[in-house]
Image: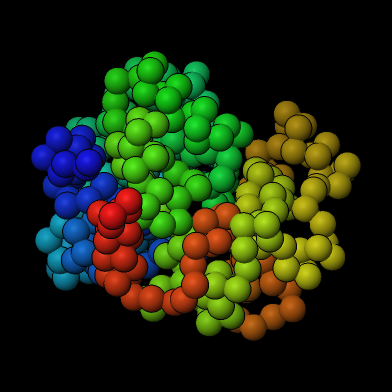
Amino acid sequence: MFQKESNPICTLLGIDFPIIIAPMFLVSNEEMIIEGIKAGITGAIPALNYRTIEELRSAIQKIKKEVKGPFGINLIVNKSNFLYKDQLAVCCEEQVDFIITSLGSPEETIKKAHQSGVKVFCDVTDLSYALKVEALGADALIAVNKEAGGHAGNLSYETFIPLLKRECKIPIISAGGIGNGSQFHHFFELGADGFSMGSIFIASTEAPVSEDYKKAIVDYEAKDIVMTTKLSGTPCTVINTPYVQKVGTTQSGFEKFLNKNKRLKKWFKALTFFKGMKKLREAAFNTTYKTVWCAGPSIEYVSEVLPVQQRVKQLIADYHNYGK
C-alpha cells in the first residue's frame, strides 16, 4: 500500500500523491495546474504553449500567486526549439519547482537548473539514455513507454519499469498506459514511484481545447490511437480520425530523405515541427475537417468530462478501493 512519507516523488515535491499532470502541447494551462495542486498532486506545462518568453514568465507568476505548491515546465531541449535558452533562463529566474526535458540532451538544463535550486526530470525511452541522464545529475526519470500519448517510447511498461528499477538509482515516474487509479497498484509493484498522466486530463473542464476535442477523448477508445511521423518528424500518437486516415501517418520518401540529410535535417525538422504544431493548434481550438487530435490509449478509461480536482479524487479513490 502507498505511503506518502516513504514515496520519493512525494518527498521530492511535497505532494500528497505522486501524480504529475503531464505537459501536453496546447492542452496544459495554468488553470489545470492550479486545480491539480489544490488536489494534492502536481503538473507541468510545455514552454511552447506560450508564444513569447514574457507570456511564459507571466504564466509562472500567475500560478505562484494563486496557489502554494509545486509545478513544472517542460522544455524541448534539442535544436528545433529556438527559444530553449530563453525558456530555461525564465524557469531558473522564476524558480519553478522542476523542469521536464524532452527530445535532446539535458546536460545544460541540469547544470543551470540545479544552480537555481530547480529539479530536473528527464524523459527517457531506453536504458542507455536513462543511465546517461542519471550520470548527468537528473533528479528523476520520466519512463516513456509505448502506450504514452504524444511522443511514445518503444518498450512496454512491464519491460521498461523493472529494467530501470534494477539499473538506476533515481526515482522513476511512469508515463503511459494508466487511465484509472486501480492500475496504480500494478505499476507500484513493477517499480514505479510516480505517474505522469496526460490524455485523461484533456477531458477536463479547465482544459482550453474545443468541446469536440474533449468529446473525442470520451468517445474514442484505445484501438483508435495510431502513430504518425507527419506532425513533428518524431513518432507521435493521435486519434485515428477520418482526416488522419485520409492523409496517412508516414512521411513521404522525399520527407524521409530531408529528415536524414546532414545539412538539411535541422531545418527540415524545425519546419515539420512548426507545420505540425500549427495543424494541431487549428484542430484543438476550432471545429475543422482537418482534425488531428493528439492522445494516448488511456482514453479508453475516460467516460465523461470532469473538473481536474474531481478526476484526481476519483483516481485516488479508485486506488484505495481496489480489491475491497
Which residue lies at the image location 40% right of the left edge and 48% below the top edge? 183
Q: Which quarter of the rendering shows the C terminus?
A: bottom left
**In this rendering, position of residue 45 left or right of residue 298:** left
Q: Position of residue 184 (x, y in %)?
A: 35, 46
Q: Residue furthest right?
A: 253
Q: Position of residue 42 (x, y in %)?
A: 26, 55
Q: Is residue 286 above or below residue 24?
A: below
Which residue lies at the image location 34% right of the left edge and 43% below the top edge? 185
Q: Residue furthest front?
A: 324
Residue 213 visible (yes or no): no
Q: Residue 29's image quarter?
A: bottom left
Q: Residue 101's image quarter?
A: top left
Q: Is residue 250 above or below residue 258?
A: below
Instruction: Between residue 226 and residue 132, name the one nearer to us.
Output: 226
Coloration of the structure image: rainbow
Which residue lies at the image location 68% right of the left edge and 60% below the top edge? 224
Q: Position of residue 320 (x, y in %)?
A: 25, 54
**In this rendering, position of residue 91 left or right of residue 22:** left
Residue 283 visible (yes or no): yes
Q: Position of residue 74 (x, y in %)?
A: 39, 49
Instruction: Between residue 140 and residue 59, name the one nearer to us.
Output: 140
